[in-house]
Image (tube, rainbow, N blue to C red):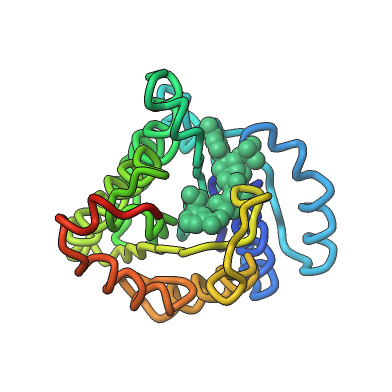
Amino acid sequence: MSYLLIIGAKSDIAKELAKEYSHRGYDLFLAARKSKELQEFAKDLSIRTQRDIKLMELDILRFESHRSFYNSLPHKPFGVISAVGYLGDQKKGESDFREARKIIDTNYTGVVSLLNIIADDFSKRGSGFIVGISSVAGDRGRKKNQLYGSAKAGLSAYLSGLRNRLHDSKVHVLTVKPGFVATKMTEGMDLPSSLTARPSETAKDIYKAQKKGKNVIYTKWIWCWIMMIVNRIPERIFKKMNF
Ligand SMILES: NC(=O)c1ccc[n+]([C@@H]2O[C@H](COP(=O)([O-])OP(=O)(O)OC[C@H]3O[C@@H](n4cnc5c(N)ncnc54)[C@H](OP(=O)(O)O)[C@@H]3O)[C@@H](O)[C@H]2O)c1
């Protein structure tokens, strides 16, 4: 049996990933906080795909629980995808360190804590893949999402180092950098439709990239070019910009 572990499984992108992989014959561990809320979704998907789908309880901020969480899985997964994320409140985080810390720990520290444990197991087994959903926000810091962006920058660098570290162990690491995706996270935001992906599109891009053994992808692909331009803006101009 080949189980894929999806963490942050209540995310809109994660749910589409669950559909994508289960329709292609994979069994799933869906890990989330209040995972019972996924019962209907999992039951329906399991009936449609005839795959085994197990719900697991996981809070990425409870670092001390991560080892026992991983050890409690009834089968070792052949791959893991992290879709955990928290945009948070940038303004609040500027004056309230608890909010700043929640943003940093959800997007970076918590994911690192769990992926370190999984990477160690995959490395010993000499197989597996790790997909981390980071963000274009990590490519260059902006005032509007400075805390979230800096945590995602840390995650992108962590995944890059992990790819390098695990290369000889035949473990594949994919960094995913979405631009805008229409999910719970961006609800109510006025996003340009031509630059905004549906969660199902993002999931398809991730599936294809994982199968092809890609290292880093931007989704939608146009974000690769957008970020190339953004990264080339001189700092003396960038620091005055309002976007
Ligand atoms: N939407 C975008 O435009 C966009 C752009 C770039 C990158 N991303 C990234 O894409 C990934 C998926 O996000 P999404 O857009 O699908 O948004 P989403 O639906 O809000 O998903 C984020 C998920 O993270 C989970 N989470 C937050 N804190 C957690 C914790 N302490 N323990 C366990 N799970 C926790 C949330 O769980 P609950 O459901 O329990 O709150 C939620 O299901 C995230 O990493 C996000 O940063 C999104």
> In the rendered image, which quarter is residue 14 located in?
bottom right
- Measuring from the top left, give residue 135's x and y in whole percent: 40, 57
Say which of 21 and 90 sits in front. 90
Q: Quadrant of the C terminus?
A: bottom left
Image position of 131 with respect to 60: above or below:
below
- Please tell me which residue is depicted at 64% across the width and 75% down the height of the picture: 24
Q: Quadrant of the N terminus?
A: bottom right
Q: Is residue 229 visible?
A: yes
Say which of 201 and 215 sits in front. 201
> In the rendered image, which quarter is residue 176 located in?
bottom left
Q: Is residue 76 visible?
A: no
Say which of 69 and 193 sits in front. 193
- Please tell me which residue is depicted at 38% across the width and 60% down the height of the picture: 136
- Measuring from the top left, give residue 80's x and y in whole percent: 47, 55
> In the rendered image, which quarter is residue 241 located in?
bottom left
Is residue 35 shown left or right of residue 230?
right
- Please tell me which residue is depicted at 65% across the width and 61% down the height of the picture: 18
- Total count of labels: 0
- Please tell me which residue is depicted at 80% across the width and 44% down the height of the picture: 39
- Measuring from the top left, give residue 97's x and y in whole percent: 38, 19
Image position of 233 with respect to 91: above or below:
below
